[in-house]
Image: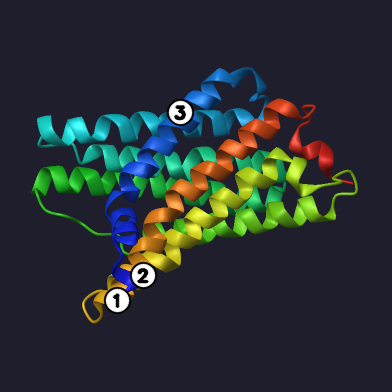
Amino acid sequence: MLLYSKTLYAIYLNSGNFGTAFLIILAFFSILNSKHFRDTYFFLFLTFVLYAIIEGISPYLSKTSQNSQWINYVYAILAATLPSVFYLKSIKNNLLNKIIIPFILVFVILNIFQFGYEIFYKKPFEQVFLFPLKNVIAIFLALVLHTKLSQSTKLKSFKNEPSFWFNIGFFIINVSNLIILPIFKAVTPFSDNLGFIFGTVYQVADPITYTLWAIGVYKLRTQPFRPIASLWP
């Protein structure tokens, strides 16, 4: 069957490595074009480079340190803070700031608490609601930014707007984490076929996201620079 073809199975098994490779390439591409990451885009530059550093060193830490779990908490904190700063500074809405900023602070504090708990008691302490809520907030911010871009009279084409490509990448990865991953975990015990399908979709979301972000970097390099806020009517 096509479902179990060698090609699809190879993608399923190696997509994590593909994702890491794509992320490292994205980081190098961003570094080469670092001078174009001005204004709010600078926070995306930090996001891409720090993501790549974490992904690059985490396999070695897991082999050499029993406490390498801390890398996951650092990753989670970066994922919640830097992209959110990009969105909040781009959208420029005081009400959103009052809602999102306290949540980010709580998220950071809970991550630090959870890691400390696991180190002290040597057992996991799961915050089941924490990451789904972070994904919901990220998806909401992505939709708000897309709406702003759609309403701007200064934006003539989405394909030439760097923030569009960055934004759709964040939307895809957060939808994947919020919806596809839980479905994959839920159906796998009952159906190998469905588990394979949703597992493959989830695994390829990362490479797709990094490719979209790379397109955003390319557009940032080739288009005349303008802060995102300048697009609003």
Residue at (39% x, 44% y) in the render: 19
Residue 14 higher or lower than 222, as above or below: below
Residue 191 higher or lower than 3, as above or below: below
Three-letter code, disc 3:
Val
Quick one: label 3, few (<14), some, or many (20+) residues within 10 Å? some
Does residue 84 appear anywhere in the picture? no
Three-letter code, disc 1:
Asn
Callout 1 touching callout 2 (CB < 8 Å): yes
Q: Distance between the residues labelled 3 and 2?
A: 31 Å
Q: Distance between the residues labelled 3 and 1?
A: 36 Å
Residue at (27% x, 37% y) in the render: 71
Helix, strand or loop at label 1? It is helix
Residue 110 location in percent, x, y?
Answer: 33, 49
Residue 221 higher or lower than 93, as above or below: above
Residue at (61% x, 52% y) in the render: 168
Q: Which is more foreground, mark 3 or mark 2? A: 2
Residue to which mark 3 is pinned: 49
Helix, strand or loop at label 2? It is helix
Q: Distance between the residues labelled 1 and 2?
A: 6 Å
Residue to which mark 2 is pinned: 197
- Specify which label sits upstream in the sequence, 3 or 2: 3
Looking at the image, which is closer to me, 53 or 87? 53
Quick one: label 2, few (<14), some, or many (20+) residues within 10 Å? some
- Specify which label sits upstream in the sequence, 3 or 1: 3
Three-letter code, disc 2:
Ile
Residue 175 location in percent, x, y?
Answer: 49, 62
Q: Tell me, for residue 193, which label it has, or none.
A: 1
Residue 193 location in percent, x, y?
Answer: 29, 76
Looking at the image, which is closer to me, 81 or 22? 22
Quick one: label 1, few (<14), some, or many (20+) residues within 10 Å? few
